């Protein structure tokens, strides 16, 4: 069964290392946004340049990833994904593959790290995500000012 893994995070967070390891061990096809930007020869001098290059890469990667998932090949996305819009794009790829396959619950989504999967529309709730979504969140509950959260050792 094909699985879409999305590893999102900021630069230097270890996304690429984890994505490569997943690609080797699953096995899966790894799409690294940085590698595509570099190999396609984009000159990145500003955030606007990066956004333009990223959009172009995603437009090329999207149909490939959808087809791989449809064919039963697992896919790993190594993307910044630290914005709601970026994570919504990943969700759109998943939904397009799912719709294309006419299999609403057969492709599992593994969220490696998500800031707020409920707000981003990935799950209906943290306690009962439902469907075929599983993973981890870095969302911390608001414990209020002056409160201390003690972690047992």
Image (tube, rainbow, N blue to C red):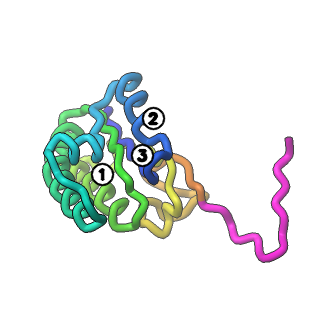
Q: Residues within 10 Å of mark 2 (few under 14, many from 20)?
A: some
Of labels 1 and 3, earlier in sequence is 3
Identify the disc placed on residue 7: 3
Q: Residue at (50%, 55%) from the top-left corner? A: 114
Report which residue position mark 1 lands on.
104
* Number of numbered discs overlaid on the protein picture: 3
For numbered disc 3, what is the local secondary structure? Answer: strand
For numbered disc 2, what is the local secondary structure? Answer: helix
Q: Position of residue 42 (x, y in %)?
A: 17, 51
Quarter occupied by residue 64: top left
For numbered disc 1, what is the local secondary structure? Answer: loop
Asked whether, in this view, residue 111 is left or right of residue 99, the answer is right
Instruction: Check the image and report above or below for 152 versus 83.
Output: above
| Image quarter in which the N terminus is found | top left
Alpha carbon distance from label 2 to label 3: 8 Å
Q: Residues within 10 Å of mark 3 (few under 14, many from 20)?
A: many
Q: Residue at (70%, 71%) from the top-left corner? A: 142
Quarter occupied by residue 54: bottom left
Magenta segment's dominant SS is: loop
Front in this rendered view, residue 64 or 16: 16
Of labels 2 and 1, earlier in sequence is 2
- Which span is picked out in magenta? 139-153
Of labels 2 and 3, earlier in sequence is 3
Q: Report if residue 145 lies within the magenta region.
A: yes
The answer to whether mark 2 and mark 3 are in CB contact below 8 A is: yes
Identify the disc placed on residue 20: none
Q: Report if residue 40 lies within the magenta region.
A: no
Report which residue position mark 2 lands on.
18
Quarter occupied by residue 149: bottom right
């Amino acid at each position: 069964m094909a699985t879409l893994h999305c590893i999102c995070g900021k630069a230097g967070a270890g996304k690429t290392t984890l994505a490569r390891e997943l690609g080797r061990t699953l096995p899966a096809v790894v799409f690294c946004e940085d590698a595509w930007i570099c190999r396609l020869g984009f000159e990145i001098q500003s955030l606007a340049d990066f956004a333009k290059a990223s959009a172009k890469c995603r437009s090329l990667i999207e149909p490939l990833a959808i087809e791989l998932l449809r064919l039963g090949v697992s896919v790993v996305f190594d993307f910044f994904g630290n914005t709601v819009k970026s994570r919504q794009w990943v969700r759109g790829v998943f939904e397009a593959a799912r719709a294309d396959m006419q299999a609403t619950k057969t492709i599992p989504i593994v969220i490696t790290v998500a800031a707020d999967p409920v707000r981003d529309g990935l799950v209906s709730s943290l306690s009962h995500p439902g469907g075929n979504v599983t993973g981890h969140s870095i969302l911390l509950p608001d414990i209020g000012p002056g409160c201390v959260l003690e972690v047992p050792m």
